[in-house]
Image (cartoon, helix red, strand yellow):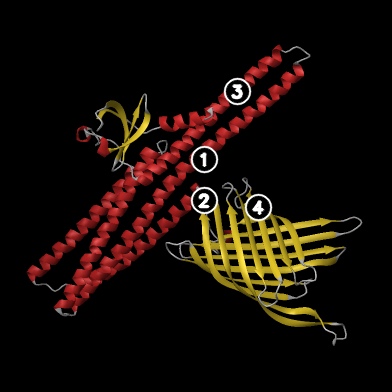
């Protein structure tokens, strides 16, 4: 193991949360004075000067009941994983800083060597000095990268906790709407003197809905407690997310709600005792509460959208505000790309390419649309003029990596053996890998392909050629790979093979490669390098290869 790896491991163990010194008696009879760090439902993590950081099952501790665990932070398995991510990132920062110190020491030594070197050896010493300076600069850059990574890890953890709370509040608001609607049903049943059994059923539904409402509130409370752990234990350098004013506001809201419920109940009791018929008024009031509760659902849903946007920002992803801030294609990952090339001299050459791509994905399905227009000319004579558009729809199935897809592609090309081509494919797909860094999926299916105005040899025609429309069927097998190299750049590769089912021995193969790198100084702007190659054995010119370099604007 290298010195760097040893230092990394030691750093991970040394970085810990607030500790408590106590004596542990193990089931094997040993006793140790340790610093308690944190606990889970089944384990305790402690630090010892000789053993370092250790985690042991509570079942193996004889004096567990005697230990003071009340002040010891309790972490869930998820929080433990988050804590480990932060510690690893912090350790990488320390390792990088140690690298800077080492490089700086070598740089100073090289400077001293240059100063002391004789004229004959000065050139070699200066080269070593330059090399040491480059290593020092590289080490400083590694520190910055490690610190940026640590910041991203912390921000993502906090944003995920915020999102969990926001989604919980939506559940609370929706449950509250359900409770109030059932309250309306009970009031209407009483108003119209319904059968006693109907009133009982409505009241039972109300009780169940009330229990769900309370459970949803408890989920929010647990999520808020988890967020405090995230902020105060896992992300120790950040300020607590929930300010005291926010906490007080939440507590006050709960108290006001309880007081309102108590007041309603008291009013109902007084009305029953005095024999006052208030059912019509109760119905109107309950309906007003439904409107208010539905508005609360909208507000809570908006809070979820804000939390999801914050999570995207923490991960370095762009937040969808729609085209030019209009809201069009909001929540879609869209882009427009333009590429130009030209030259003049003995010949005049020019080319123009425009792309529009957009993509949407949620837990249930995915839409993916890609299109481009390409025009090129040599000496003012067009040499390439084409349009391509592809739409893919995927349907996801819960708790499985399998999905179903349907896709359609349209081509118009002035210089192909056909003028228009349309194809439609269906089949199953499988998501082999889907992580923050890698995505890899495969597809198989069948394809119908229609070609219009295809030029074929015709001895009966005066020109020897004629144009016909054709229909063909193909099998399809393909794969898509996405590599998110960093938050600013990604690489994609797709390859699809289409063996013909109507013309034995014929086939098509389509390969598309792209690399996109975002530009730091302008939000949404990026550069794109693309390669597209289609090989079709039926065409008079089988291979169709082109590449492009474009400026891309994402929104």
User: Residue visible at 56% across and 47% down?
Assistant: 487
Q: Nearer the viewer, residue 413 or 318?
A: 413
Q: CA distance from mark 4 to mark 3?
A: 36 Å
Check disc 1 and report the residue beneath it. 149
Q: Nearer the viewer, residue 264 or 224?
A: 224
Residue 190: quadrant of the picture:
bottom left
User: Residue visible at 20% across and 56% down?
Assistant: 259
Check disc 3 and report the residue beneath it. 104
Q: Position of residue 431 (x, y in %)?
A: 52, 60
Q: Crowding near pointer 2: few (<14 within 10 Å), some, many (20+)?
A: few
Residue 222 to residue 370: above or below: above
Check disc 4 and report the residue beneath it. 515
User: Residue visible at 38% across and 46% down?
Assistant: 78
Q: CA distance from mark 3 to mark 2?
A: 35 Å
Q: Crowding near pointer 4: few (<14 within 10 Å), some, many (20+)?
A: some
Q: Position of residue 307 (x, y in %)?
A: 43, 53
Residue 131 to residue 336: above or below: above
Residue 464: quadrant of the picture:
bottom right
Check disc 2 and report the residue beneath it. 436
């Amino acid at each position: 193991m290298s010195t760097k790896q040893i230092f990394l491991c030691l750093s991970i163990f040394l970085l810990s949360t607030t500790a408590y010194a106590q004596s542990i008696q193990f089931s094997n009879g040993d006793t140790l004075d340790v610093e308690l760090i944190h606990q889970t439902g089944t384990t305790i993590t402690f630090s010892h000067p000789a053993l370092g950081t250790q985690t042991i099952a509570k079942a193996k501790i004889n004096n567990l009941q005697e230990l003071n665990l009340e002040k010891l932070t309790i972490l869930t398995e998820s929080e433990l994983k988050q804590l480990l991510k932060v510690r690893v990132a912090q350790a990488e920062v320390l390792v990088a800083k140690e690298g800077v110190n080492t490089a700086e020491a070598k740089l100073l030594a090289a400077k001293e060597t240059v100063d002391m070197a004789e004229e004959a050896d000065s050139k070699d010493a200066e080269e070593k000095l330059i090399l040491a300076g480059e290593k020092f600069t590289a080490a400083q850059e590694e520190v910055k990268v490690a610190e940026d990574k640590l910041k991203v890890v912390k921000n993502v953890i906090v944003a995920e906790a915020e999102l969990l709370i926001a989604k919980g509040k939506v559940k609370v608001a929706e449950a509250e709407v359900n409770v109030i609607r059932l309250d309306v049903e009970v009031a209407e049943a009483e108003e119209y003197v319904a059968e006693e059994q109907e009133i009982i059923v409505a009241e039972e539904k109300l009780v169940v809905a009330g229990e769900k409402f309370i459970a949803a509130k408890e989920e929010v409370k647990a999520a808020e407690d988890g967020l405090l752990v995230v902020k105060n234990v896992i992300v120790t350098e950040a300020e607590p997310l929930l300010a005291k004013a926010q906490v007080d506001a939440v507590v006050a809201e709960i108290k006001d709600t309880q007081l309102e419920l108590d007041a309603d109940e008291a009013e109902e009791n007084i009305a029953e005792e005095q024999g006052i018929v208030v059912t019509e008024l109760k119905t109107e009031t309950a309906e007003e509460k439904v409107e208010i509760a539905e508005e609360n659902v909208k507000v809570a849903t908006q809070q979820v959208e804000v939390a999801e946007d914050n999570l995207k920002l923490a991960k370095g992803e762009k937040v969808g505000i729609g085209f030019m801030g209009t809201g069009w294609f909001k929540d879609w990952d869209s882009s427009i790309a333009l590429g130009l090339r030209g030259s003049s001299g003995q010949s005049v050459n020019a080319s123009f390419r425009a792309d529009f791509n957009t993509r949407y994905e949620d837990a249930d399905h995915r839409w993916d649309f890609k299109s481009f227009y390409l025009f090129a000319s040599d000496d003012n004579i067009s040499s390439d003029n084409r349009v391509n558009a592809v739409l893919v729809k995927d349907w996801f199935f819960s708790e499985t990596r399998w999905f179903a897809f349907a896709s359609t592609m349209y081509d118009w090309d002035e210089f192909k053996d056909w003028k228009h081509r349309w194809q439609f494919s269906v089949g199953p797909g499988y998501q082999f890998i889907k992580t923050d860094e890698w995505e890899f999926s495969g597809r198989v299916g069948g394809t119908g392909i229609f070609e219009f105005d295809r030029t074929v040899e015709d001895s009966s025609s005066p020109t020897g050629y004629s144009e016909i429309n054709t229909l063909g069927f193909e099998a399809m097998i393909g794969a898509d790979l996405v590599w998110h190299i960093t938050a600013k750049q990604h690489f994609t590769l797709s390859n699809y093979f289409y063996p013909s089912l109507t013309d034995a021995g014929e086939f098509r193969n389509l390969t598309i490669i792209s690399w996109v790198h975002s530009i730091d100084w302008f939000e949404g702007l990026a550069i794109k390098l693309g390669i597209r190659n289609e090989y079709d054995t039926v065409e008079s010119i089988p291979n169709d290869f082109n590449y492009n370099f474009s400026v891309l604007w994402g929104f």
